[in-house]
Amino acid sequence: MSNSTLGSITKIGHNNERNITLRDPGHYAIYKWYHYDIDKDNIVALIDISASCRQYVEAWCYRTDSDILQWLSRQGSHMNNWGGVPNGTDGCACGIAGNCVTGKPCNCGANDNQWRYDAGYLADKDYLPVIGVVFDDIDDSNEQTARKIGKLECYGSAT
């Protein structure tokens, strides 16, 4: 537990807190799973008693055409909103702001010879924590992608 401007924060780590980078010719989509330091029932109990929870997600992409960056909710549902975008809206924060490099919903959809970046917080308590991510469009030997999922952070009291 730590203190910040949000008050006391409880952070729950997982097995993949560093970047996961993939270059895997021959595979269009690969799933990577996250296992937390405490069991799911205790995580859900913490989320339920907290005023707010959030989790930072980052994606780096090189020569990929990932218009939508997907993560998997605690229920196992494919979610199409990347950090900074509310549930029910597909895309990334730059797509909502209208400033993605190519006008697509995410910078990772640029499919060019530059590393592109999409990031932000997921904050819908009903779906957190992230239990997996989908790495897509890495079927060419020139394509690479990386993801980093931060710790689940919960703060405040729901009562």
Image (tube, rainbow, N blue to C red):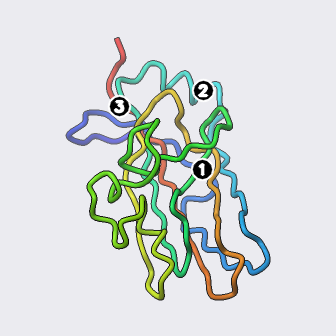
For the N terminus, give its image quadrant: top left
Name the residue at the left extreme: 5
Could you say whether the residue bearing mark 3 is in a helix, strand or loop? strand
Residue 129 image point, x, y percent: 55, 39
Question: Measuring 32% from the left and 59% from the top, which residue is drawn there?
Answer: 94
Residue 106 image point, x, y percent: 43, 62
Could you say whether the residue bearing mark 1 is in a helix, strand or loop? loop
For label 3, count other residues whose C-alpha is less than 10 Å away and answer few (under 14), some (14-19) or many (20+): many
Q: Amino acid at mark 2?
A: Asn
Q: Of callouts 2 and 1, which one flags the residue occurring earlier in the amino acid sequence?
A: 1
Q: Of callouts 2 and 3, which one flags the residue occurring earlier in the amino acid sequence?
A: 2
Location of mark 1 (residue): 14
**Drawn side of residue 38 relative to residue 19, left or right:** right
Question: Measuring 32% from the left and 51% from the top, which residue is drawn there?
Answer: 96
For label 1, count other residues whose C-alpha is less than 10 Å away and answer few (under 14), some (14-19) or many (20+): some
Residue 42 image point, x, y percent: 60, 26
Location of mark 2 (residue): 42
Q: Amino acid at mark 3?
A: Tyr
**Drawn side of residue 69 relative to residue 134, left or right:** left
* The label number, if any, that marks residue 78 in the structure image: none
Circles 2 and 3, Cβ within 8 Å, touching? The answer is no
Q: Of callouts 1 and 3, which one flags the residue occurring earlier in the amino acid sequence?
A: 1
Task: Pick whichever, 8 or 18, lies toward us.
Answer: 18
Disc 2 to disc 1, how far (Cα)? 14 Å
Task: Pick whichever, 98 or 72, lies toward us.
Answer: 98
Q: Is residue 153 above or below residue 56?
A: above
Could you say whether the residue bearing mark 2 is in a helix, strand or loop? helix
Q: Is residue 57 above or below residue 3?
A: below
User: Splitting the image into 4 quarters, where does residue 17 fall?
Assistant: bottom right
Location of mark 3 (residue): 155
Question: Measuring 58% from the left and 49% from the top, which residue is drawn there?
Answer: 71
